[in-house]
Image (spheres, rainbow, N blue to C red):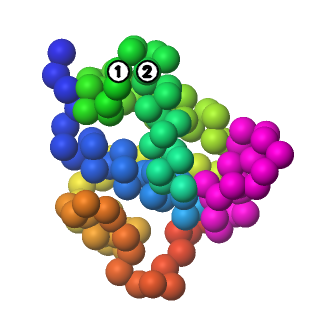
Amino acid sequence: MTERTTQQNKSLHLWFDMIEKSAENQGVTQEMLIRHATQLRVTSWWLKSAVHQLIKALWGYTSTTQLKKTGDIDIVIDHLTDWLSKEMEVPPFPHDDQKTLQENMGYKTGGHYDYPDDPNFELPTI
């Protein structure tokens, strides 16, 4: 099987950043998602850590680079969406090309990380 594409990797990390911003805008904390006593902010890093735990449990993978282009990435997205949607509105996974992402969401893609151009940018309510 073919490993996931670079674009899928960029989209996965962009989606984590979008979820982080959406959770922040909605006042959703890690506590609300995992029901621990301490309030912790939902961050991209925390989401990536959760995905690493998920892929290790599901397939024994140690890196998201091992996710298959077809199938694995969809399963990860479905698991994460099902889990997060119990407490928050989850932004859709960015399937569009880079230009569409930039036009619709204000994100610059292609670098190490993806941030909106405008420092006052807020994701639209879904």
Q: Name the residue nearer the viewer: 52 or 6.
A: 52
Q: Amino acid at mark 1?
A: Tyr
Residue 118, percent from left and from top: 41, 84
Which span is picked out in magenta?
Answer: 23-42
| Residue 21 shows in this picture | yes
Residue at 75% over, 47% down:
31
- The residue that label 1 is drawn on is 61
Residue 7, percent from left and from top: 22, 46
Q: Which label is found at residue 56? A: 2
Q: Is residue 68 left or right of residue 12?
A: left
Residue 32, percent from left and from top: 76, 47
Q: Amino acid at mark 2?
A: Lys
Vertical arrangement, residue 95 with respect to residue 51, above or below: below
Residue at 37% over, 70% down:
115
Which part of the image, by quadrant, shows the C terminus?
A: bottom right
Is 24 inside the magenta-drawn segment?
A: yes
Q: Name the residue nearer the viewer: 45 or 108.
A: 45
- The first of marks 2 and 1 along the sequence is 2
